[in-house]
Amino acid sequence: MSTLITPLLQLRDDEQGVTSIEYGLIAAVVSVGIIGAISAFTGSLNNLWGMITDTVLAAI
């Protein structure tokens, strides 16, 4: 029985690689925030580019 429990306890106490997982989670949260911000401003940016296009075409 101890041959099964000992490796499981070692696996539970092993903290190697935890930092990589934390950095991965931080990167995922930042990515979701950036995607959300881009999605929120997409309509405004399209309107801005439309106004610029109209102004340039009117000047030609």
Image (cartoon, rainbow, N blue to C red):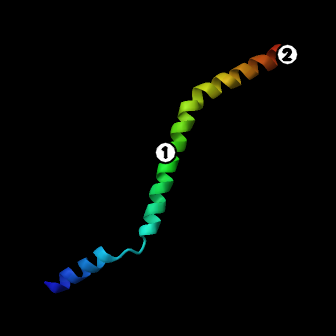
On the rendered image, what quadrant is the C terminus found in?
A: top right
On the rendered image, what quadrant is the N terminus found in?
A: bottom left
- Residue 43's label in the rendered image is none
Task: List the residue tagged with mark 1.
Answer: 32
Label 2: how many Cα within 10 Å (few below 14, some 14–19, many 20+): few
Q: How many marks?
A: 2
Where is residue 31? Give x, y as percent: 52, 48
Q: Residue furthest left?
A: 1
| Residue at x-position 57% and y-position 36% | 38
Tell whether 23 sits left or right of 44: left
Q: Compute the Cα span from label 1 to label 2.
A: 40 Å
| Residue at x-position 41% and y-position 75% | 16
Tell me if residue 10 comes above or below residue 38 in the rendering: below
Task: List the residue tagged with mark 2.
Answer: 59
Between 12 and 7, the one nearer to me in the picture: 12
Kind of element beneath mark 2: helix
Tell whether 9 sits left or right of 56: left
Tell me if residue 20 comes above or below residue 38 in the rendering: below
Tell me if residue 59 comes above or below residue 7 in the rendering: above
Where is residue 29? Give x, y as percent: 47, 50
Between 19 and 46, the one nearer to me in the picture: 19
Where is residue 54? Give x, y as percent: 75, 17
| Residue at x-position 68% and y-position 24% | 48
Where is residue 46? Give x, y as percent: 64, 25
Q: Quadrant of residue 41?
A: top right
